[in-house]
Amino acid sequence: MAGPVRQPIDLQALEKYIEKHVPEIKTPIDIKQFGFGQSNPTYQLLSSNGQKYVMRKKPPGKLVSKTAHQVEREYRVIHALEKTDVPVPKAYCLCEDEGVIGTPFYIMEFLDGRIIEDPGIPGVGEEERREMWHDAIRTLAKLHRVDISEAGLTSFGKANGFYDRQIKTFGTISAAQASTVDIETKKPVGQIPHIEEILGFFKDKRYQPKDRGTLVHGDYKIDNLVFHKTEPRVIGILDW
């Protein structure tokens, strides 16, 4: 649910940008902030004609990870997938000018559906729960079947060496998080248990699958999917 704005933005500057670059969004707008997707602050925009939109922006200040907050990358992949059978929201614009609201941002369609936070999917029947998970799997398969060349994403990333890059990135992020000081104990939170053993296992080439170039979401889980309000099907993948 969207609520009060916890990370304020320059609403006047945002409206001025929207009026120039996204005329289908009618100003003035009302703004709220979602409680999820906060690796990149996420806002709900309500236009003057009652239409809802979503804005995601890069957080301010020094970033722990150079790869975890790339809203430019999110916009590009969502926009490219609009031409495929992968369910994604419509992407309206990308602003890379930090002078507008402080950091880059993009605006996309608001999908009016269900976001499930509990993987057990409480509150639905057994058959519907099973079908929701099946459609989540079918949706992931659709993503992995996308022809990168046809989607215009050949320069999106490197098609080889994926596992080694991910292991390196995970190790770097884990080390940075380990040095973060707990606000209650005033001590570093420390390493994830057995992290060195885990990284060592995945670095072993014997356990790595062969490279095959395809799109990977990076955080594909139940609460990054939007389900239809009454049907057990995915209508959008979020939080790239």
Image (spheres, grey):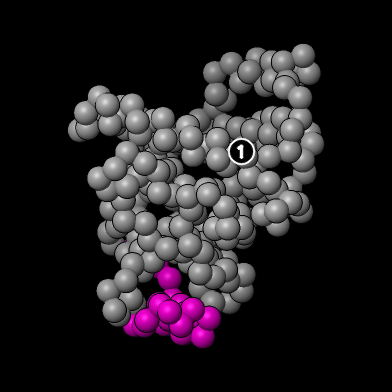
Residue 10: within the magenta?
yes
Count neighbours of disc 1 (C-alpha within 10 A) and say few if under 14, some if 14 to 19, many if 20 or more. some
Residue 144, given in percent of the width and then of the height, sits at 61, 38
Residue 145, given in percent of the width and then of the height, sits at 62, 39
Residue 16: within the magenta?
yes
Query: Residue placed at 66% from the left, 49% from the top?
Result: 66
Query: Residue placed at 32% from the left, 47% from the top?
Result: 228
Q: Is residue 16 above or below residue 33?
A: below
Q: Nearer the viewer, residue 194 or 121?
A: 121
Magenta residues, start to end = 5-28
Q: Is residue 165 above or below residue 85?
A: above
Q: Nearer the viewer, residue 128 or 206?
A: 128
Residue 12 visible in image? yes
Residue 214, given in percent of the width and then of the height, sits at 68, 39
Describe residue 150's horizontal placement relative to residue 55 as left or right.
right
Q: Amino acid at mark 1?
A: His
Q: Nearer the viewer, residue 195 or 180?
A: 195
Query: Residue placed at 73% from the left, 38% from the top?
Result: 213
Residue 43 visible in image? no
Query: Residue placed at 63% from the left, 45% from the top?
Result: 146
Mark 1 — residue?
A: 144
Q: Is residue 161 above or below residue 62?
A: above
